[in-house]
Image (spheres, grey):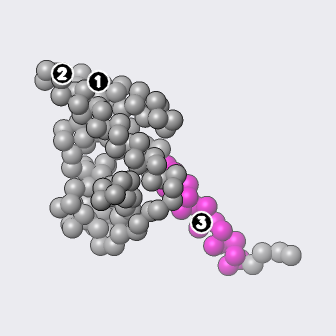
Amino acid sequence: MALTEEEIDRIADRVAEKAIEQLDMQNLLLHSLPYLHGSPGIVVDEERAKASACKCVEYAPGKKLCWSPGIIGALTDEQERIYCPTMIEIERPGTVLRMRWFQESVDVCKAELAKIPEAPGEERARAWMRCMKRELNARGVEA
């Protein structure tokens, strides 16, 4: 039985959505950079951020991370009010676990960098990226 054009379009849309989501999630090193300076997310395309739905994951009871196209990194509560016209709650176990591991890695690296005297920005960024890569990989997340 042949698929209709409508069925093919629906399948293509679902595949495209999953591919985009996977690309967003695979850039965890990039999305960790704002934490180097304490957060918030770095707005790179404000128009897109304001027009797009935010995706949020509750990675631990009462703890959530939200992100939006147009912003690098997780959003602060204030950014959520500004840039999230709608929110999509992501509850897939794999994504929840990945975000938990991401936040654990951020917490470890924040503590590690707190022990390092202020270094020039480039050195500090390299140390951050090495730490995040190590911590994500240790948790089974390819970074």
- The magenta span reads 5-23
Q: Nearer the viewer, residue 113 or 37?
A: 113
Q: Which residue is mark 3?
A: 14
Q: Which residue is mark 2?
A: 116
Furthest residue in direction right, as rendered: 1
Q: Residue at x 25, y 41 (%)?
A: 35
Q: To which quarter of the image does residue 130 belong?
A: top left
Q: Residue at x 30, y 56 (%)?
A: 63
Whether the residues at callouts 3 and 1 have beta carbons within 8 Å, the answer is: no
Whether the residues at callouts 2 and 1 have beta carbons within 8 Å, the answer is: yes
What secondary structure is marked by label 1? helix
What secondary structure is marked by label 2? loop
For marks 2 and 3, the one nearer the N-term is 3
Q: Which residue is mark 1?
A: 127
Question: In the rendering, at what x and y percent does residue 136 appear?
Answer: 43, 34
Whether the residues at callouts 2 and 3 have beta carbons within 8 Å, the answer is: no
Q: Residue at x 24, y 33 (%)?
A: 110
- Which one is closest to the eye, mark 2 or mark 1? 2
Question: In the rendering, at what x and y percent does residue 48 appear?
Answer: 32, 63
For marks 3 and 1, the one nearer the N-term is 3
For marks 2 and 1, the one nearer the N-term is 2
Residue 20 visible in rendering: no
Distance from the alpha carbon under mark 2 to that under mark 1: 10 Å
Q: How many marks?
A: 3
Question: In the rendering, at what x and y percent does residue 127 appear?
Answer: 29, 24
Q: Residue at x 35, y 64 (%)?
A: 54
Q: Amino acid at mark 2?
A: Ile
